[in-house]
């Protein structure tokens, strides 16, 4: 209190409300992968975590889509058909995954570019070293406190090698204690049963820190990439060999002649318009051309689910709260899962008695769309941490209280401070209970906060400068299995 020496009237404002913790953000994904460019105001953004708030902001700083190249092969089983597939090192998912993230409710996020693909004509090789080197993205993210989720859509391109990186991500999340990881499994392959894909994932993901991550399967058939986003420029030069005789071939010959003239003159703008018109002419006149592009588009639209799930987490957190399980929601811009998983198949994926490594399934339901039909962490056998919403709610509460109590570091470790801290934590938890995050008819049933000498501390603790706070919580858990019993009763006379 100030010392007043001059006569007069002085006003002192007294606090009317106790201090309270503020809930930290819960859905700020860190997306790690390859971008078209990584530059802002002339400065490189490679290896620089950059917050964006919209897809337009992403495009401004990191550019557009990767332009894949495809090869066309005659189908030996049917001479009138053909097979389209990726050229080597021409399969990247990052840009379209960001589109899927925002289509499913995404908001602010952090982009960490590990390399750029630009206009590389020979594709870009996905390297494990871009993700797990000592000074790589996980080390960089240690000094970036904002993200609460970690998503790496391009990593699964490494197939089995991706799972070793996943173990590093889990260790990172455990060390930070403030974020949660979303993982993809390998894409469905006709040579492998879905159960084999899941078994391989379980055998290679390790056994440590499993409560800090969740896995989703299968991949998604999306409609992110529209029909005119791929053209003959994504096809080999021999694409014209697969066009029908007659008008399509004449269109190609005319194009070839005009292109040679413009190319010789260096008229790039006119070449661009020529290419655009050539694509439209072939699309309207050639069924084979349309079929080739549709096959290519189907490949590009097959995406790992992690980014869509991150968008779903964001939407659920913003509309219901982090304590609501991110399951039983449909996914936008998703036509179907790549492979359909039955209820019987899901039993082993969801609950695995031996390892406890739950894999959340994405399934189609008639009239409802494609639903996320699982809400478990990889630690499915843990009574404490089996549910995603419980793990993420505890992360939010822990980090919120941690930040709030920083103000009391070096304050007197006495009863006055203990009362203030206890009131602050209890007030914060009461607000969460009112919002539905904690279970109990009254606050006393939802949480318990203890602090002080004889409660959580001994005289030795005080001498050592320790203030120990004990918080017990009853976090709401999802109704995963709803069982309704029916019984006939005798007719009443």
Image (tube, helix red, strand yellow):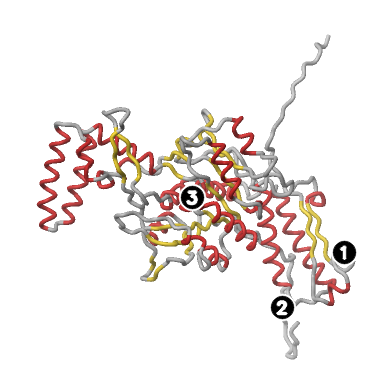
| Quadrant in the picture for residue 297 | top left
What residue is pinned by disc 1? 455
Q: Are marks 1 and 2 in contact (CB under 8 Å)?
A: no
Q: Is residue 397 above or below residue 230?
A: below
User: How far from the left and from the top, in percent, is residue 14?
Assistant: 74, 72
SS of the residue under disc 1: loop
| Quadrant in the picture for residue 77 | top left
User: How far from the left and from the top, in percent, is residue 217?
Assistant: 54, 41
Q: Nearer the viewer, mark 3 or mark 1?
A: 3
What residue is pinned by disc 3? 156
Distance between the alpha carbons at the discs numbered 3 and 1:
49 Å
Distance between the alpha carbons at the discs numbered 2 and 3:
64 Å
Say few, some or many: other residues with alpha carbon within 10 Å of mark 2 (under 14 / 14 to 19 / 20 or more).
Answer: few
User: How far from the left and from the top, in percent, is residue 150?
Assistant: 55, 56
Q: Quadrant of the N terminus?
A: bottom right
In this picture, residue 400 sits left or right of residue 468: left
Q: Are marks 3 and 1 in contact (CB under 8 Å)?
A: no
SS of the residue under disc 3: helix
Q: Residue furthest bottom?
A: 5
Q: Say which label, 2 or 3, has the lower sequence index.
A: 2
Say few, some or many: other residues with alpha carbon within 10 Å of mark 3 (under 14 / 14 to 19 / 20 or more).
Answer: many
Q: Quadrant of the C terminus?
A: top right
In this picture, residue 63 sits left or right of residue 482: left
User: How far from the left and from the top, in percent, is residue 384?
Assistant: 73, 49
Q: Nearer the viewer, mark 2 or mark 3?
A: 3
What residue is pinned by disc 2? 11
Of residue 151 and residue 199, the one placed in the foreground of this image is 199
Q: Nearer the viewer, mark 1 or mark 2?
A: 1
- Give the residue drawn at x 9%, y 52%: 261
């Amino acid at each position: 209190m100030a010392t007043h020496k001059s006569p007069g009237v002085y006003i002192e404002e007294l606090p009317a409300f106790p201090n309270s913790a503020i809930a930290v953000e819960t859905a700020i994904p860190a997306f790690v992968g390859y971008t078209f460019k990584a530059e802002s105001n002339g400065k490189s953004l490679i290896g620089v975590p950059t917050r964006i708030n919209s897809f337009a902001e992403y495009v401004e700083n990191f550019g557009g889509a990767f332009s894949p190249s495809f090869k066309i092969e005659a189908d030996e089983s049917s001479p009138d058909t053909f097979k389209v597939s990726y050229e080597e090192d021409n399969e990247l998912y990052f840009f379209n995954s960001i589109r899927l993230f925002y289509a499913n409710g995404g908001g602010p996020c952090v982009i960490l570019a590990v390399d750029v693909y630009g206009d590389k004509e020979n594709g870009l090789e996905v390297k494990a070293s871009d993700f797990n080197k000592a000074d790589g993205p996980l080390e960089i993210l240690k000094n970036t406190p904002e993200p609460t989720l970690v998503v790496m859509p391009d990593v699964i391109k490494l197939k089995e090698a991706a799972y070793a990186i996943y173990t590093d991500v889990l260790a990172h999340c455990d060390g930070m204690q403030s974020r949660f990881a979303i993982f993809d499994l390998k894409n469905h392959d006709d040579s492998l049963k879905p159960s084999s894909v899941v078994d391989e994932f379980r055998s290679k993901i390790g056994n440590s820190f499993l409560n800090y991550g969740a896995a989703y399967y299968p991949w998604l058939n999306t409609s992110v990439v529209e029909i005119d986003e791929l053209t003959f420029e994504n096809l080999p030069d021999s694409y014209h060999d697969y066009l029908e005789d007659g008008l399509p071939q004449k269109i190609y010959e005319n194009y070839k002649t005009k292109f040679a003239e413009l190319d010789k003159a260096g008229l790039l703008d006119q070449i661009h318009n020529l290419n655009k018109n050539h694509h439209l002419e072939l699309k309207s006149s050639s069924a084979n051309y349309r079929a080739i592009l549709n096959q290519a588009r189907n490949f590009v639209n097959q995406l790992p689910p992690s980014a869509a799930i991150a968008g779903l987490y964001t939407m659920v957190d913003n509309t219901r709260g982090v304590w609501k399980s991110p399951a039983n929601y449909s996914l936008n811009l998703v036509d179907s899962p790549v492979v359909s998983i039955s209820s019987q198949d899901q039993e082993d994926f969801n609950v695995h008695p031996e390892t406890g490594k739950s894999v959340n399934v994405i399934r189609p339901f008639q009239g409802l769309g494609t639903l996320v039909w699982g809400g478990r962490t990889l630690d499915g056998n843990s009574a404490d941490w089996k549910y995603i919403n419980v793990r993420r709610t505890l992360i939010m509460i822990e980090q919120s209280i941690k930040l709030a109590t920083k103000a009391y570091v070096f304050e007197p470790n006495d009863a006055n401070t203990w009362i203030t801290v206890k009131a602050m934590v209890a007030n914060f938890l009461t607000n969460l209970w009112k919002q539905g995050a904690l279970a109990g008819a009254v606050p006393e049933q939802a949480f318990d906060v203890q602090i002080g000498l004889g409660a959580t501390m001994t005289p030795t603790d005080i001498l050592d400068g320790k203030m120990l706070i004990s918080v017990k919580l009853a976090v709401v858990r999802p109704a995963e299995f709803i069982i309704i019993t029916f019984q006939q009763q005798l007719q009443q006379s």
